[in-house]
Amino acid sequence: MLRSIPLFKDLSDTDIAVISDLAIDKNVAKGNVVLTEGEIGDSLYAIVSGRVKVFIGDEDGREIILKILGPGDFFGEMSLIDSQPRSASVSTLENSVFKVLSHSAFEASVERAPRIATLVMQALAKRLRDADRKISTLALMDVYGRVANTLLELAITNNGKLVVGEKLSQQDIANMVGASREMVNRILKDLSDRGYISVEAKTITIHDEKLPPSF
Ligand code: CMP
């Protein structure tokens, strides 16, 4: 199972066996919180199967989704590296299976395979790039542009069609772009009426990659 996670794919058989002994399996059912923003924690979670959302919330229950992560991705590395409280909350969108490494287990892994440290740095650099892009879209685009941009960022090709890879509710999209569900509903309807997308059972198909900038 560990080998399916890019972070551990370069480990030798012996090292994989050692890390397997150090890592704890954790199964979390859909809809549960795995990490809570502000809590102390120093373990890293690698996703074997399932899907999670990384988000920041406020007391009124509003949230902004920072990222959706899936198999092969990991989270929880920030507190492990800087010993600060968790920077965001993470909850499961599907039943999920994780390999959890404590601080000491992570250090042992890096000692045996220093490339793990490089892979974590690469992932952090990618997260910063994504975050920079998100800041610029939040600051520079209107809501219409942010919704269109988010759909394109999540798009994958499936059977020759461009579809949004995640089955997202309108509330999820709203939480990703910092808008109300009602506004997202209006925008999706407009994009659909104009033939740019079609929506069926939460699957959004994109018919024209050049989504229009506004109503
Ligand atoms: P940590 O701060 O330990 O706990 C919350 C985790 O969410 C954090 O580590 C990262 O693994 C993850 N995380 C925080 N911000 C982002 C982001 N912008 N993109 C992807 N993952 C993130």
Image: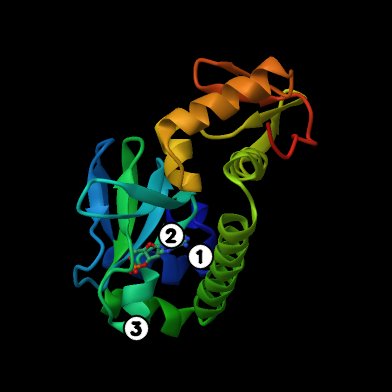
Question: What x and y, as percent, mark residue 190?
Answer: 64, 22
Give the residue drawn at x 49%, y 32%.
183
Q: Which residue is mark 1?
A: 7
Q: Which residue is mark 2?
A: 74
Q: Name the quadrant where ligand 1 sits.
A: bottom left
> For this view, does 190 lie left or right of residue 86?
right
How packed mark 2 is, by other alpha carbons closer than 10 Å (few <14, some 14-19, many 20 or more), is many
**Which numbered dot is residue 53?**
none
Give the residue drawn at x 26%, y 37%.
31
Q: Quadrant of residue 115?
A: bottom right
Nearest to N terminus: mark 3 or mark 1: 1
Label 1 and label 2: CA atoms lie apart by 8 Å
> For this view, does 13 lie left or right of residue 149?
left
Looking at the rendered image, the quarter that the C terminus falls into is top right
Label 3 and label 1: CA atoms lie apart by 19 Å
State whether residue 96 appears in this view.
yes
Residue 211 or 126: which is nearer the viewer? Answer: 211
User: Is ligand 1 within 8 Å of the beta carbon of the residue shown at mark 2?
Assistant: yes
Question: What x and y, as percent, mark residue 118?
Answer: 56, 78
Label 3 and label 2: CA atoms lie apart by 16 Å
> For this view, does 109 lie left or right of residue 9?
left
Residue 62 or 31: which is nearer the viewer? Answer: 62
